[in-house]
Amino acid sequence: MDSTINDGRALQRLLDELGRLPGIGPKSAQRIAYHLLEADAEEARRLAMAILEVKQQVHFCPVCFSYATRDTCDVCADVSRDRSSICVVSEPRDVTAIERTGSYHGLYHVLGGVISPMDKIGPEQLHVRELLSRLADGSVSEVILATNPDVEGETTATYLSRVIRPLGVRVTRLASGLPVGGDLEYADEVTLGRAIEARQEV
């Protein structure tokens, strides 16, 4: 039995759903919707299948909490990575931004957000406990704090530095080059690469 609704509002529903996506305003939603209307059915089917597949197959890596399609993410599974270094980021998309630079070859740890008292997000709501567990065996010699250079990111970095340092692990922070208030996701490769290479002790 066909579960689709035929109430004459299919196009409006598509526009509404596209408009909910970040960075997509009403005009962009219209352009995408009209492109899909003009495309053949196979192209629309491929897009719909890709969306369903990513929701069904992608999950959080149990080690670093980045996105994974297998048991662990590709970085954690790569035996050639430098396992003495962990780069701490706020969100999985920040891993992609840093990987694009080609300047970093260690592991990652995704916090799942930043400390934000205004939003009632403290260390307990982030993957801080799991990070400390990864440092417990002494195999990691450096933790790079790569949270965004804004108030919440700086607060999170300061807190992490305070709890990690007593473990005898070197703690560094991405150097200047990233604009204050900016997002790693939108930084260009050269700026982000220089920031990684010129990271400083905190």
Image (cartoon, helix red, strand yellow):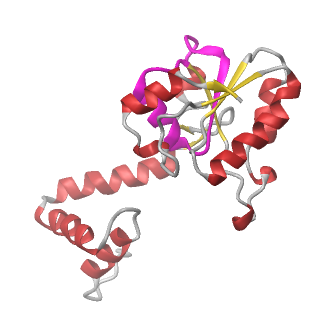
Residue 172: which quarter of the image?
A: top right
| Residue 113 seen in the figure | no
Image position of 133 with respect to 16: above or below:
above
Q: On the picture, is 174 further left or further right than 177?
A: right
Image position of 163 with respect to 33: above or below:
above
Q: On the picture, is 43 further left or further right than 77?
A: left
The residue sitting at the right extreme is 166
Q: Residue at the spot x=32%, y=57% of the render? A: 48
Q: On the picture, is 165 further left or further right than 62?
A: right
Q: Nearer the viewer, residue 14 or 136?
A: 136
Task: Estimate the x, y position of residue 43 in percent, counting from the top left.
Answer: 19, 53
Magenta residues span 78-105
Q: Residue at the spot x=76%, y=38% of the render? A: 160
Position of the N terminus by quadrant: bottom left
Instruction: Give the tally of numbered discs.
Output: 0
Q: On the picture, is 192 further left or further right than 132?
A: left
Task: Estimate the x, y position of residue 188 in percent, counting from the top left.
Answer: 37, 36
| Residue 148 seen in the figure | yes
Residue 199: which quarter of the image?
A: top right
Task: Estimate the x, y position of residue 89 in percent, counting from the top left.
Answer: 61, 39
Position of the C terminus by quadrant: top right
Image position of 45 with respect to 141: above or below:
below
